[in-house]
Amino acid sequence: MTALAYLSGRLPDGDANGLYALVPDLVADPAAVRVVVALVDCVKVTQLVDAGGTVPTLRIRRVEAISDAGDRADLERLLAREFERRTGQLVLPLDLERDVRAAFDGSDPAAGGDTPAAGDGPPEPDPPPSKPRRRR
């Protein structure tokens, strides 16, 4: 039997649910891929009598949306390393690479992953400070 796992549809309550911070962004751009980090455990194990296996149901204990670009870059490297460890593949499949890139740099996966999503791009530089005026 193939290894299966279910995910509980319930999110943690209160401060353990950092997804609330994403609500305005999700409404503004529902198709964009976001980066989150979650802590999970097993809330139950289901015995599949006919199929002959057991299936754990994961519970999200804590979840946070990652908004800092530096943190996203670190997580992108960690995600790639864990994918390589788990699968033995040294390169992500193209579709997965596009999804990962979109999650971490804001590109649009529907456009091949190299096009910045609408409204994204480098931040505008701060204007130079104005010189103080001399009094006469």
Image (cartoon, rainbow, N blue to C red):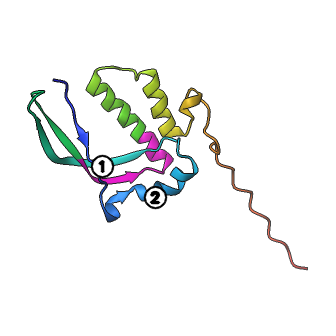
Q: Quadrant of the C terminus?
A: bottom right
Type of the residue with mark 2:
Ala
Cβ atoms at labels 1 and 2 below 8 Å apart: no
Question: With 63 as the anchor, is 69 left or right in this view?
Answer: right
Give x and y (percent) for residue 26: 51, 50
Instruction: State the residue position of label 1.
Output: 9
- Mark 2 residue element: helix
Residue at the extreme front of the image, as rendered: 50
Q: Quadrant of the N terminus?
A: top left
Q: Quadrant of residue 131?
A: bottom right
Task: Find residue 46 and name its label.
Answer: none
Query: What is the span of residues highlighted in magenta in the rendered image?
Result: 59-74
Q: Earlier in the sequence, mark 1 or mark 2?
A: 1
Determine whether 114 is above or below 73 in the image.
above
Residue neighbourhood size for the residue with mark 2, other residues' Cα within 10 Å, grouped as few (<14), some (14–19), many (≥20): few
Residue at the spot 19% in from the left edge and 24% down from the top edge: 2
Give x and y (percent) for residue 114: 59, 29
Question: With 43 as the anchor, is 111 left or right in this view?
Answer: right
Type of the residue with mark 1:
Gly
- Mark 1 residue element: loop
Give x and y (percent) for residue 87: 28, 23
Determine whether 13 is above or below 3 in the image.
below
Instruction: State the residue position of label 2.
Output: 21
Residue at the spot 30% in from the left edge and 55% down from the top edge: 62
Residue at the spot 45% in from the left edge and 43% down from the top edge: 72
Q: Quadrant of residue 82?
A: top left
Determine whether 63 is above or below 33 in the image.
below
Q: Nearer the viewer, mark 1 or mark 2?
A: 1
In the rendered image, residue 24 lying in the magenta stretch gets the answer: no
